[in-house]
Structure formats: C-alpha cells, structure tokens
Amino acid sequence: MYATSPMLKPSDLQRCLGSTMSDTVELDLESNPQAIRGYAFYDWAKSSFETSVTTAVLPAWFAYIFLKANGLEATVLGVSMTSDAIWSYSVSIAAIFVAILAPSLGVIADRRAIKIWWLRILTYLGAASTFLLAFAPMLGVSQQWVWLIVMFLMANVGLNGAGVFYNALLPHLGTDDEMDAISNRAYAYGYLGGGLLLAVHLIMFLSITGDWVIPFIMASSGVWWLGFACLTFAWVPEPPIENEMEVLGVADSAKFAFGELKKTFGQVTHFRTLFIYMIAYFFFIDGINSVSALAGIYGVTVLGLTTGNLIAIILIIQFVAAPCAIGFTILAKRTSTHYALSFSLVMWVVVIVGALSFAPLVLESHDEYDIQFDWDADGDGIADAEDDDTDGDWYSNAAEEEAGTDPLDPSSTPNPNPSIWLQQRLAGKGQYIVSVGDGTYE
C-alpha cells in the first residue's frame, strides 16, 4: 500500500475543526493500545486492494482482457477510449462520487455516533466488489472487461468512502502528541500487511500455472480486506457524541447536512488558516492518490511491464516504505509535523517528475527506431522497402489516412504494390535486413 505518504492523516488543524465545530466529546484523551492496534489493522486490511489489486495485478489483467475483446480502443458513450483511459475515468468517477457525498456524511457523523457503522458498510462494499472481480472469467469475452471496471469502480467507492470515516477516528485515539506515532504506525502496518499478501501472490503467480490464479488473487484480496477489518470493528470503539441528534430520514439528513455546510463555509474568515490547509490538502492528496491509482495501468500500457514485474516492484516498495513510515515519526519529533509533511511532499514531487522520464517518446520515423526491419526483395543486401507501421502493408498510418484506406488492414492500401511485396515475403522471396544500432544483419 503506498496510496498516501506518512504524515497525511488528520493533523492538528483537522482536530481543531472537530473539537470546535461539532458536538464530539473531548479529543485529547489517553490512548487505548488495543484500539490503536485495531485502527492500524485497517490499514493492514485495505492494503490488499491497494497493492495486489489496484497496482500489481488487476491493471495487466484488465488491459489484456480489454485488448482481447476490443483491440486497442472501445467506444463508450460514443467516445473511443483505450484501456488506460477507461481505467482513469473509473478512478475519477469513484473519487468525485465520494467527494460529493463526504462532506454531508461527515457532518452527520459529527452529530451521530455512526463512524464505525459507516466504516463497516463501506468496507463491505469495497471488499465484496473486490471479491467479485474473480467472477469475470465466467462471462463472455465482450462482457469481462465491463464487469472488471464496474467492480473496480465500486471497490474504489468503498475504499475512498471508508477512508473518510477511518481518518475521522484518528483524533479520538490518543493525545495530540501521539497523533504522528499512531498515524505512522498504521502506515507501517499497511505496508507490511500489503507486502505480506503480495509476496504470497507473487509466489503463486510464478509457481502455479492455470487460469484460476489471477481470479484467486482478486478473491483472496477481498477476503483479506474484510477479514482483518473485523479486528478494527471489534477493537476500535465508536467515539461518543455529546448532544447526539435524533435519527432523521434521508431527505431531512441531507437538508441538515447542507445547512451545516453552509454555516461552516460562512465562518471561513474565523478559520482562515484551516481552510487554506484544507484546500491545499485537497490538491496534494488528490495528486498522490491519482499517481497510486494509475501507476499500475501506466506501467502496463506505457512502460510495457508484465504482471510479474509489477508485483516484484510493488513488493520492494512495501518493505522499503514500512521502516520509512516509522522514520517519519522520528523526523516529526525531532523537527515538526509541518517540516516532515513539507519534506515528504517535496521528495514526492521530485520522484514523480523523475518517473516521467521513463515514459517512451513517440518515434516519428523509421530511422529513429533502435531495431529496424527493412525488406530486400532482390537479395542484393540493399533495402528496397521500409515499413513505418506494424500491419504488414508497408504504409504508415498517416499515409493511409490521407489516401482514405484502412491503416489496420494490410489488404487495404493506396496501390497494389505493397500487397505484392507482402505476398513475396509470405512466399519466402527476398529477405529482411535487420539494423540494430550501427550493425546490419541479413
């Protein structure tokens, strides 16, 4: 799990918001060791989805199934989209859905003791959707990728929604001085838990052959999420509420929530620093979550990584990041939470900018490729034709589009000569000239 760097859980500013603007009882209470363990185990639990599913295994599986069913693109709502575009939209839809509902749910959760209840319901949604990913092979080829993306979207709604109430529990678990240690301990649990399950999945993927392996990884990730979350439900008490409001219907709850939000935004001038922080938090946490949610599909579709590559890379990240999470606790104690947060964000930006350099550039001509295949029809060692595309008709996509022919169909060409060259190749006449760097081979 590496969706969010340490130090990014609710801070002192957010704690002030809870104590000043809600009826929740005093926050600065002595910590309960069992409750802290239960809180940390939720990070351990949900990291199965964030590592094995979102980043390591599902991106490659989805891209393969999408390609098998549609080729490079599919038309969705009248728009042609690639697999990585559809993946990105699903992540965005889930995030926007939760972002719209979260403020209202948060207001109600501050007035009623329902944080654990909502955490439980949204965990059920996320874990069940993750488990149901395993059923994709039972459907037709054209339906499998749709099932995967719908279940992935629902699982993301569960994950992001549960995160709202999970983070809201933190201020009630200990004193102000303990917040960094509790938060970073939870992150360390998440890295270790996600890494442990991912190691098991890597062993299975490398040692077992069979179509059932990847569906089993999906199902086991859902079971892991729900199973260890039960420790959270059992060990973390529901924070008590003073002057708890009565139960309201859906319409009345929404009306009350939006009324409270309007009142809160009307007090912006009284909490200027807090609101500046919240706006900044919205942007930097969204950037971090976007990278973590799209890293897997980026690795598959842009960098050409295999499932085995992704699992190995994420596994290394897990066990490097776990001690680093504890290290940020030490850094915050020796400096300040503000410094530790700023340092982590600056380093994050440096790493992400560096990661962009791994993206391959789009080559514009045949001569720019490191390995070039040219056709020598008469055997004199001199290339007679070169192909700028991969469909076998020796015309580039741009040339075919200009001529009005199909760039993906080798039989559809501006003139018959390329088809003759293709027939000659298939008949064994002539030979390829392969250029690798400065060397030429026949």
Image (spheres, grey):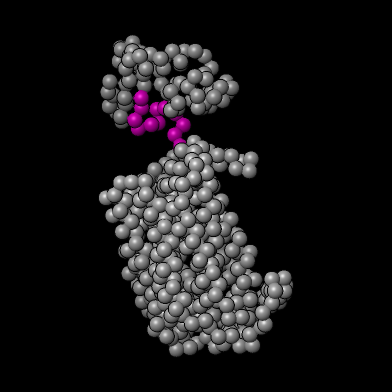
Q: Where is residue 350 in the image (x, y as percent from the top left)?
A: 42, 58
Task: Work out whether residue 368 can be spotted.
Answer: yes
From the viewer's side, name the closer residue of 429 and 57: 57
Vertical order, 342 against 428 (above or below): below
Q: How many marks can you see? A: 0
- Determine the image quadrant of residue 428: top left
Vertical order, 147 against 362 (above or below): below
For the C terminus, the image quarter is: top left
For the N terminus, the image quarter is: bottom left
Where does the magenta region start and end? 362-373
Q: Is residue 52 magenta?
A: no
Residue sitting at x 40%, y 70%: 228
Q: Where is residue 159 in the image (x, y as percent from the top left)?
A: 50, 64
Task: Work out whether residue 2 can be spotted.
Answer: no
Q: Position of residue 284 (x, y in %)?
A: 52, 63
Vertical order, 65 against 292 (above or below): above
Residue sitting at x 32%, y 69%: 323
